Amino acid sequence: MIEFNNVVKSYSEGNQALRGVSMQIEDGEFAYLVGPSGSGKSTIIRLITGELRPTSGTVHVNGYSLERIRKKELPFMRRTVGVVFQDFRLIQDMTVYDNVAFAMRVVGAREKDIKERIPYVLELVGLENKSSRYPNTLSGGEQQRLAIARALVNNPSTIIADEPTGNLDPARSVEIMSLLQEINALGTTMLVVTHEQDLVERFQKRVIVINDGLIASDRMGGYQL
């Protein structure tokens, strides 16, 4: 579960990115986080991943209190959260298989577990026949599927997808959103940051709107800023 309670985040230059945000995302839920540029979306993501700590208020993610988490606990918390980025962040000189394997190796997974897990995850995202390909030989949609596989491979309870369709054409965007919906149906909590109103309208889920560092609305269905 993700829970923000009256969270304020100020940066050193005096900019107050969040001005008292409270929200709760339950285990297994699918929610969008939307809002204009500079509204506080990125700050929320960085708080969830433990990159930032709140100036005041509390942030709880999957059983961890992030306002007072110890440095040695951060890697364990981060294993519960997979992140998918707009720009994919793939390792270009590694194959599809090795990109996903790398994510397991950095958390100390055994080679036996890697060999068992990766075929399942690649099949889940539709890349089971492309394990020996390199990222630059894949389409944009396939590269995003690979990024999703990498986020999924350590079996996190939560996935944060930060503008996952921002670099894709409309048809590929629908494919990626459908895939995220399928992953959510398997029990993974999904928080999707997006500015694409058409996708939000097509895939009707909970929509949390942030504007000027505050929650402007929180409801099912579409949104208007």
Image (cartoon, rainbow, N blue to C red):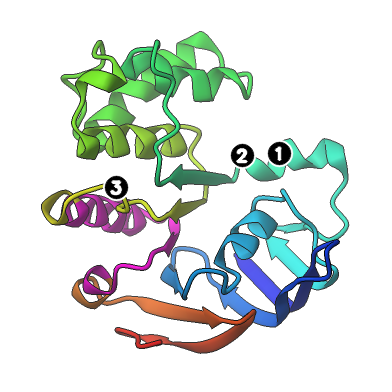
Q: Is residue 188 magenta?
A: yes
Q: Amino acid at mark 1?
A: Phe
SS category of the residue bearing label 2: loop
Residue at mark 1: 76
- Residue 214, how many percent across, how many down? 63, 84
Mark number for residue 220?
Answer: none
Closest to the observer: 94 or 190?
Answer: 94
SS category of the residue bearing label 3: loop
The residue located at (65%, 57%) in the rendering is: 48
Identify the image quadrant of residue 16.
bottom right
Q: Amino acid at mark 2?
A: Arg
Question: Would residue 83 be visible to someone looking at this image?
Answer: yes
Span of residues in magenta: 173-199
Q: Quadrant of the C terminus?
A: bottom left
Q: Is residue 2 magenta?
A: no
- Residue 62, how many percent across, how many down? 65, 57
- In the displayed structure, 111 sits above or below 125; it is above
Say left or right for 148 vs 77.
Answer: left
Of labels 3 and 1, earlier in sequence is 1
- Residue 149, how many percent across, how many down? 36, 34
